[in-house]
Image (cartoon, grey):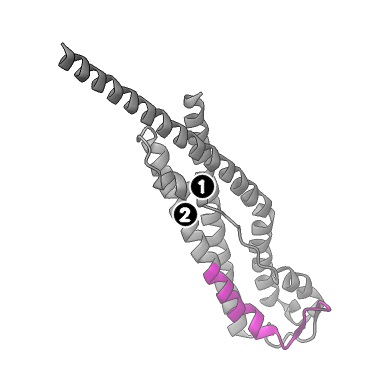
Amino acid sequence: MELMIVILGISIAFQVQVIYEDNQNARRELIALERFQSENELNLSEFESLMPYRINMEQNTRILHMILDSPFATNPDSIANYVFTLQRISTPDLPTGAMDGYLKGNHDQRNPELEREMQSLKALYAELKELTSHYWEKKTAYFYNPIKSEVDFSKQQVLSTDNFTSISFRNDLWSLFLDEIEQNRLYKESYDKLIHVQSLTEQALSSRQ
């Protein structure tokens, strides 16, 4: 009888420990989901704040290229606005600490779809970061360096259009335009994926309540 009581006591203690660990794991997962949701909200705001800029950059790059292919190419006033608009480079700042924390967490696999979509979103973020970094270097080589002797950026004045009208510069500008298109495609794909992941996150949080 005493042996049975000991065995029963050990069994009950083990079950209590299992329940406690499950509860703790669920609590850790809940906290990780809440942090990820907050991170997603910041990233959504970042994407949305840069949307007008991204559209504007693609349009202005195309317009400048069209002007340089036209009879107005040698008129500094006709290209000045586009030159100084294209001078700007803004890239999204997308933290991933909460996403990395969730993916590395020891959860109970109740959200396999969410984790798959997180991995896909993380890959898109990495691709977007690499593309924008490459674009920064390319724009310096193709845009800033060729015209820096013809433009006074501090006074926003185009002093000469010799390099602007060269076939080399126009070809490089067209290459930058194609990169703008690719950035915007990837930007939209990342944004759409983020919205989907945020929806799955909200569903996961609702199931915990």
Q: Measuring from the top left, give residue 30's x and y in whole percent.
A: 48, 34
| Residue 142 visible at all | yes
At horizontal 78% and vertical 70% (from top left) the residue drawn is: 81
At horizontal 47% and vertical 60% (from top left) the residue drawn is: 127
Magenta span covers which residues?
133-156
Magenta run includes residue 151: yes
Quickly name the residue at label 1. Answer: 98
Quadrant occupied by the N terminus: top left
User: Which is more N-terminal, label 2 or label 1?
Assistant: 1
Label 2 is placed on what type of residue? Leu
Against 3, residue 23 (above or below) is below
Q: Measuring from the top left, give residue 207's x and y in whole percent.
A: 47, 25
Name the secondary structure under disc 1: helix
Foreground mark, 1 or 2, reads 1
Kindly report the secondary structure that dominates the magenta region of the rendered protein.
Answer: helix
Quickly name the residue at label 2. Answer: 124
Q: Quadrant of residue 76?
A: bottom right
| Residue 196 visible at all | no
Alpha-carbon span between mark 1 and mark 2: 16 Å
Magenta run includes residue 134: yes
Against 18, residue 140 (above or below) is below
Q: In screen coordinates, is 38 left or right of 83? A: left
Q: Measuring from the top left, give residue 208's x and y in whole percent.
A: 48, 26
Q: In screen coordinates, is 175 left or right of 23? A: right
At horizontal 43% and vertical 54% (from top left) the residue drawn is: 123
Q: Measuring from the top left, give residue 203's x and y in whole percent.
A: 49, 30
* Residue furthest front as drawn: 2
Label 1 is placed on what type of residue? Ala
